[in-house]
Amino acid sequence: MKIKRKDLLTKVLPVSAGMVGLAYCKPAQQGGGENTNNPKIMWKLTSSFPRSLDTIYGGAEVMAEYVKKMTGGNFNIRVYPAGEIVPGLQAMDAVQNGSVEMAHTASYYFTGKSEALAFDTSVPFGLTSRQQNAWLYHGGGLELIRSIYSDFNIINFPGGNTGCQMGGWFRKEVNSVNDLKGLKMRIPGLGGKVMSALGVNVQVLAGGDIYPALERGAIDATEWVGPYDDEKLGFYKVAKNYYYPGWWEPGTTLSFLINKDAWNKLPEHYKAILEAACAYANIDMQAKYDAKNPAALQRMVKQGVKLRKFSDDIMKAAYKASTEMMEELASKDKTYKKVYESWKKFRGDESEWFKTAELTYANFSFLAK
Ligand code: CA
């Protein structure tokens, strides 16, 4: 590699000087001489989540802690909960305009900017957590999603997963599509659109407003995440029927968004460290949910919660409505079509594979006594 004279002076020489300093002149460094190979960098990260959701919010803290450790304390990313710098749903704008360098959020909040961003998070009857990682990391998914974010001066990394969510809390049993008609349910996003196509009266409520609405009967049902998070919000106290699966969010993936100018200014090894820390946080969140959900579910069942499976009637109607909705979006939006086609092919291949060893093993082993 040819090194320009300017680079030799600004990049190579300080490395050698630093190494010599480390070996022979350690006390002299204690005055705080800057090591240009490991520059001090301070970033702000806005999370779209409150601190109380420790598993999701904690994903950003896990990432930041590893970045700090791996850079010997030189690269610090300070995590702010939703609302301290900007409200949760403005995370993408804040990264784009540079008011923060980074965000931890879910891309499906930003389908108003590009419908195809939903595939970065989860879509009805979409990929499971493992399949989503396979598509993003090794199936061309990340490249496709990055080409969308690139128009907003953002680079994204997968940043955690909830796994397959629960279908949520219903005051009364719903056994058929007919029972859904006129039901007032809090359910956001594409899942809400599908429910609406099935006759549900879809409500949009912020996290803190759901419990009181369910308690006083202003809504008949709500979905949230899964046992560990749902238990904290207390829905089981006022709606005893806990349905599954949350077919609208089978592998909800969180995302780290980084302002591209800030990213481009990082030394190459800081970029690698940040990428590795994001990947660690991505895996760690799913592991935490998988470790914490069973006990939370058992505690709620002891409180009288009835676990109920969505009927085939509801599942089939929802699948049909979801597919029609995605085909329609693809017919209207070129970017959506491009991502949808990659995703659809990948989903088909994954289903063929997962229905062999994984499904057969799960069907036998999860039920064995
Ligand atoms: Ca949900």
Image (cartoon, rainbow, N blue to C red):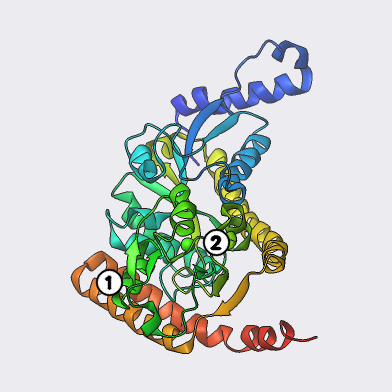
Q: Secondary structure at mark 1?
A: helix
Q: Position of residue 214 (x, y in %)?
A: 46, 59
Task: Report if residue 144 is visible in the image.
Answer: no
Q: Nearer the viewer, residue 183 or 258?
A: 183
The residue shown at (68%, 31%) is: 72
**Mark 2 surroundings within 10 Å by alpha-carbon count, few (fewer than 14), some (14 through 19), many (20 or more):** some
Q: Position of residue 50 (x, y in %)?
A: 52, 42
Residue 291, quarter of picture: bottom right
The residue shown at (66%, 87%) is: 363
Residue farthest to the front, as pictured:
216
Instruction: Check residue 95 in the rendering and tell me which mark sits there, or answer none.
Output: none
Q: Position of residue 308 (x, y in %)?
A: 57, 78
**Mark 1 surroundings within 10 Å by alpha-carbon count, few (fewer than 14), some (14 through 19), many (20 or more):** some
Q: Image check: 23 left or right of 234? A: right
Q: CA distance from mark 2 to mark 1?
A: 42 Å
Amino acid found under the numbered disc labelled 1 = Lys
Can you identify the residue that label 2 sits on?
238
Ligand 1 within 8 Å, label 2 CB: no
Q: Image check: 39 left or right of 18? A: left
Q: Nearer the viewer, residue 165 or 119?
A: 165
The residue shown at (61%, 28%) is: 74
Q: Earlier in the sequence, mark 2 or mark 1?
A: 2
Amino acid found under the numbered disc labelled 2 = Val
The label nearer to you, 2 versus 1, is 2
Can you identify the residue that label 1 sits on?
337
Q: Secondary structure at mark 2?
A: loop
Q: Image check: 200 left or right of 10? A: left
Q: Position of residue 42 (x, y in %)?
A: 52, 27
